[in-house]
Image (cartoon, rainbow, N blue to C red):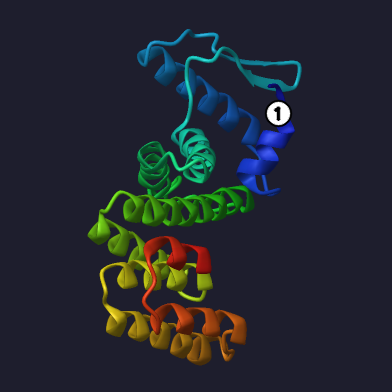
Amino acid sequence: GPIGRYEVIDAVWGGRPTKAVDSTLNATLSRIRSALVVAGGEADFIVSEQGQIEMLGHRFTSDYHDAVRAGDRCVPMMRRQEFAEAWVQATIAFSIGNRRLVVGVESDWLDHQRDHLHHLVCRALAVVVIAAMARDRAQDAIFAARELVRREPHSDRGVQLLVATLLNVGDRGASRLAVHEWVARLQSELGVLPDDHTLQALDRSINRRSDLAESLAEL
């Protein structure tokens, strides 16, 4: 829908527009129109009039919105146990969300979008872990869980999923090491310890023989 011209200026320039901001915005819109024409669109795809800017039609989308849509689809699919479909959508969300957004440009608006993509990527990785285990792709699950821990080093979600994947292949030693490293990281970097409930749940999972369903239920 239409958005106010000065809302765009405030978002892009972070409330600190230059004196030539109007001409810069006009030139930028012109370049975008030209790029869209090359991609097969119409010259009037972007309309700028009466202080409003609007993109017309539904022919074009952005990678950002493709990633968000895929991320929104994968979780309900996983809950319905449509693991193959959830895997595909989560992989799309991860692949796109993993790209750097507007490199070299800093603004509060972009920081918000980048933060959103970070959480989107982590959610997609969690879905990949569960879908991979359900599809007997143990190494893919372990790889995704380790990547999730790397991106969320202090979160209990990553270590819980990593423990589940390692237990799924019978590697209790690596499971204990993953928990030990997580606890040490929390203590050294944040000066805190995990709550007793989380540690007890992880300990119960590691020290008993349980099938995949029980391990996931524990999470």
At x 35%, y 39%, the residue is 84
Question: Hey, what amino acid is under mark 1?
Answer: Arg
Q: Image quarter for residue 2? A: top right
Q: Secondary structure at mark 1?
A: helix
The vertical placement of 57 against 194, above or below, is above
At x 37%, y 66%, the residue is 211
| Image coords of residue 210 (percent x, y) | 39, 71
The vertical placement of 15 against 129, above or below, is above
| Image coords of residue 51 (percent x, y) | 75, 22
Quadrant, the N terminus = top right
The residue identified by callout 1 is: 5
Left or right, 189 with respect to 89, comes to right
Depth check, front residue: 147 or 57? 147
| Image coords of residue 58 (percent x, y) | 53, 15
| Image coords of residue 13 (percent x, y) | 63, 45
The vertical placement of 191 against 149, above or below, is below
Residue 165 is at least partly visible in this image: yes
Residue 219 is at least partly visible in this image: no
